Image: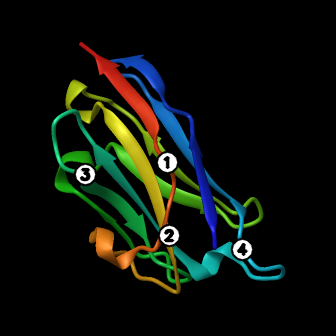
Amino acid sequence: QVQLVESGGGLVQAGGSLRLSCVASEGVPSGQSFSLYATGWFRRAPGKEREFVAASSYSDHTTRYIDSVKGRFTISRDNVKNAVYLQMNSLEPRDTAVYYCAAKFLGGASSLETEYNYWGQGTQVTVSS
């Protein structure tokens, strides 16, 4: 089983930036490229259900974003480090949430939670006004 660990969250002012990291610290078979995993970012704001933020498919690098983050957030990866990143610019208070990364072997850039079988435990992002 692939173990995902998020980091990089914190407290920032509106308009600021953060880069979230998600590292597959365990479970990736030896010799298997992280590029074979689709990755996604989801978030849960206080009192709300978890929602899709961004995703990247395996190999073909197709990406998807919710409309509210387009032009501000960028999902990327480093296959050598078995990591996926979410660069978050022009942050707004509405972006405040716990952010989770997810992955699926040979998956697509899906916005559906049910399409992912590996999940991290989340990292807190708080954007002040």
- Which residue appears at 46% of the width and 63% of the height? 102
- Which residue appears at 39% of the width and 35% of the height? 89
Q: Can you say whether 59 is above or below 20 in the image?
A: below
Q: Position of residue 50 (x, y in %)?
A: 25, 51
Disc 2 marks which residue? Answer: 103
Label 4: state its secondary structure. loop
Give the Cα distance between marks 1 and 3: 13 Å
- The C terminus appears in which quarter of the rendering? top left
Give the Cα distance between marks 2 and 1: 13 Å
Tell which of 117 and 127 is nearer to you: 117
- The N terminus appears in which quarter of the rendering? bottom right
In the rendered structure, the answer to whether residue 98 lies left or right of residue 33 reads: left
2 or 4: tag closer to the N-terminus: 4
2 or 3: tag closer to the N-terminus: 3
Given the image, on which type of amino acid does mark 4 rest? Answer: Val
Residue neighbourhood size for the residue with mark 1, other residues' Cα within 10 Å, grouped as few (<14), some (14–19), many (≥20): some
1 or 3: tag closer to the N-terminus: 3
Label 3: state its secondary structure. loop
Mark seen at residue 50: 3
Q: Nearer the viewer, mark 1 or mark 4?
A: 1
Disc 1 marks which residue? Answer: 121
3 or 4: tag closer to the N-terminus: 4
Given the image, on which type of amino acid does mark 3 rest? Answer: Arg
In the rendered structure, the answer to whether residue 123 lies left or right of residue 13 reads: right
